[in-house]
Image (spheres, rainbow, N blue to C red):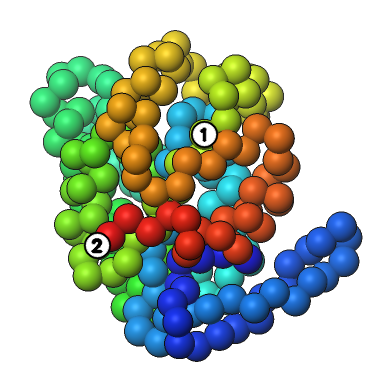
């Protein structure tokens, strides 16, 4: 049940788990290059888990994780809120360029790219859209409440936990900058599998941004 590679021409059937049983669900796919799905959200929203589950539900997919890509920098890494600020900004731009380059290459090869990245502003989203042109981009903001994100963050593997105290500011900034774009998906009452199923089924209809 997803949405990134989809359009109106070819159709595939993907088998998804439903209450422990496999259900056959028709999914439309593009005859050209697959669409690109970007999933963002605050720390603890579930980006990594959900993009992995969505990718597993698609016949040809590639998951692109911004955090994993940053780990390719062996020496000299500065994280997004680190110092010096100008170098942090330069490395964020480099990360975004690399994510889009990989996404374009996978798409050209017939794989649906799923980008897991923190996109806090319209400016950052527009940068992705420019680099991903002419592909159709589906933009999903996982948006459970702040307390849900905080709780989910605390129960992560300690190696994956992200200490962050700016939830309120980030939430307000994202809603101001991106509130009318893509699909703001409140997943607080859903399991990761349910969330992935919904994205596969509905993203084409609800998340297109270009």
2 or 1: tag closer to the N-terminus: 2
Which residue does the image show at 19% across and 59% down from the upper left? Answer: 131
Query: Which residue is found at the position 47% from the left and 56% from the top?
Result: 206
- Residue identified by numbered label 2: 132
Asked where in the image residue 164 lies, by quadrant, the reply is: top left
Q: Residue tagged by mark 1?
A: 143
Residue 4 pos. (x, y %):
46, 66
Judged by depth in the image, the label closer to the viewer, 2 or 1, is 1
Mark 2, secondary structure of its residue = helix
User: CB under 8 Å between callouts 2 and 1?
Assistant: no
| Foreground of the two, 1 or 82 | 1
Q: Residue at x 70, y 74 (%)?
A: 25
> Based on the displayed image, in which of its 4 quarters is residue 207 positioned?
bottom left
User: Is 170 situated above or below 186?
Assistant: above
Give the SS element for disc 1. loop
> In the displayed structure, does residue 161 sit left or right of residue 69?
right
Depth order, front residue of 186/19: 186
Q: Residue at x 52, y 34 (%)?
A: 143
């Amino acid at each position: 049940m997803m949405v990134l590679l989809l359009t109106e021409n070819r159709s595939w059937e993907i088998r998804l788990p439903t209450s422990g049983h496999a259900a056959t669900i028709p999914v439309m796919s593009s005859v050209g290059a697959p669409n690109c799905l970007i999933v963002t959200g605050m720390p603890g929203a579930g980006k990594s888990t959900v993009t992995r589950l969505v990718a597993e539900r698609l016949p040809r997919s590639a998951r692109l994780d911004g955090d994993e890509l940053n780990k390719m920098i062996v020496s000299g890494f500065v994280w997004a809120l680190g110092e010096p600020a100008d170098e942090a900004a330069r490395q964020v731009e480099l990360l975004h360029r690399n994510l889009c380059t990989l996404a374009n290459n996978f798409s050209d090869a017939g794989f649906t790219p799923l980008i897991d990245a923190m996109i806090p502003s319209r400016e950052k989203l527009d940068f992705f859209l420019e680099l991903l042109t002419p592909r159709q981009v589906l933009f999903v903001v996982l948006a459970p409440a702040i307390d849900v994100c905080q709780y989910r963050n605390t129960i992560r593997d300690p190696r994956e936990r992200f200490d962050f105290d700016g939830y309120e500011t980030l939430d307000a900034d994202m809603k101001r900058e991106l509130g009318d774009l893509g699909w703001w998906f409140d997943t607080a009452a859903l399991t990761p599998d349910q969330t992935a199923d919904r994205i596969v089924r509905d993203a084409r209809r609800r998340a297109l941004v270009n």
